[in-house]
Amino acid sequence: MDILSPRKAPSTSKPDRAITPIENEPSAVTITDIRQWIGTAEEKLEAAYDAAERGEPIDTLLDHINHDVILEACRVIQRDDLTQADAQRVYQKLFPVLACVQGAIKLAEGTVLHTTLEEAFALLDAAQTALDSVNDAVRALPKGGDAHDFQRGRDLAVEMLKQCRGNPSAGECQRRNRDAGARQINVVGDYFVEAMCEQSLFEGFTAVLSGAIGPQVLEPEYFEELTLADTQPGIAGEDGTCWDDEDQAATTAPPEPAGTAADPGERIFEAYWTWSCATEILDHYAANSGSALDFAALELAQGALKKLSAADDNTKALCEEASGAMSSAVAVARACSEVSNDAGSHEALILAGVRKLFEMALSVLDEATLALAENEPNE
């Protein structure tokens, strides 16, 4: 429409009965009613803006209402997954809208715009009243909140990443990057506008991008289960167990349930797995080194592995026997590491790593053996 052309007077006909604010109990109001009232009010405000004389104070005010103040309330109320938190957000956002419309009504006195603006105000006022948290239509919605908003922003960012990492044609790929003389295909622009216009999406949206932008290559699906709690300091997860501050963890972390700190069966398996990995590394190393000492360490490690595989959480004696065999292998592995010609060489680092793994496995097994001894019934 030409900005210099005269504007038409807005329609002042009464809204249909289906979208007229009802005057009975709020319990009779549905979310569909509220959406219709806000949508119809928006249409009336836009019609009033189109009809206002350009350059007048009411033109400026209606421009502000239509293209700034009312936008978030209109956008949020139309969500398919509307929550109680969303309803409360719309309720609060309607206060400045109503105040501005009241000002416009005052400015429109004696003009054809007055009735239209009064009708818009009545619709918005009824919608805000119905959005009070005590009303049944709102109470029936899921609770929502910060965690839910985070997931919405997360999902928007994941959708954007999938769009960016799709399989475009060679021509589209070129235009996404640069193509002299042609407008760039800006895949992310609309997504950023949506995240910036709706502040509740911003944290989840940027959390995904913070993880996705970097030298590592992570598929969009990696972020699909990211939660708000995962990105916060302090308690990890929804009710987690780990804290940022180690001193705080020492004084405030809940006590570990009995039996989980050093479950013998799990610890024995952990020792077996660690020892097995170290033995395999030593096997490959000894085959290349040809050292008699390395082969001696390997033979002792393999013998200890057999004893360790026979141990279980019901046989403390077998655990002690395996521990003795492992101690002998650890001693020889230390000797192998100490006689290595060059402390900084690749070979020396491998031997030091093998020795460290052996020592870790032995320590874990000894913890399990001690737990078995403590759990034995008194004679």
Image: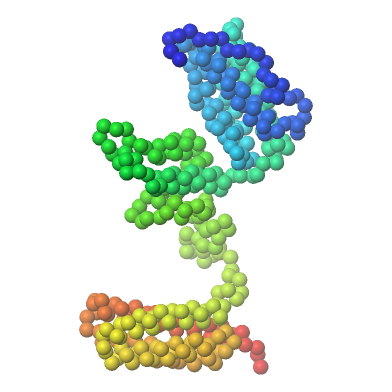
Residue 49, percent across and down?
52, 16
The quadrant of the picture occupied by the C terminus is bottom right
**Residue 360 in view, yes or no:** no
> For this rendering, which residue is in front, 360 or 4?
4
**Residue 65 in view, yes or no:** yes
Q: Quadrant of residue 48?
A: top right
> For this rendering, which residue is in front, 254 or 333?
333
> Quick check: 199 above or below 368?
above
> Quick check: 81 above or below 220?
above
> Quick check: 274 above or below 292?
above
Q: Residue at x 29, y 85 (%)?
A: 287
Farthest-out residue, top: 110
Q: Residue at x 27, y 80 (%)?
A: 348
The quadrant of the picture occupied by the N terminus is top left
Q: Residue at x 58, y 7 (%)?
A: 111
Residue 272, percent across and down?
47, 82
> For this rendering, which residue is in front, 210 or 2?
2
Residue 240, percent across and down?
55, 60
Q: Residue at x 73, y 25 (%)?
A: 22
Residue 257, percent across and down?
61, 71
- In the image: residue 332, left or right of residue 249: left
Q: Quadrant of residue 103?
A: top right
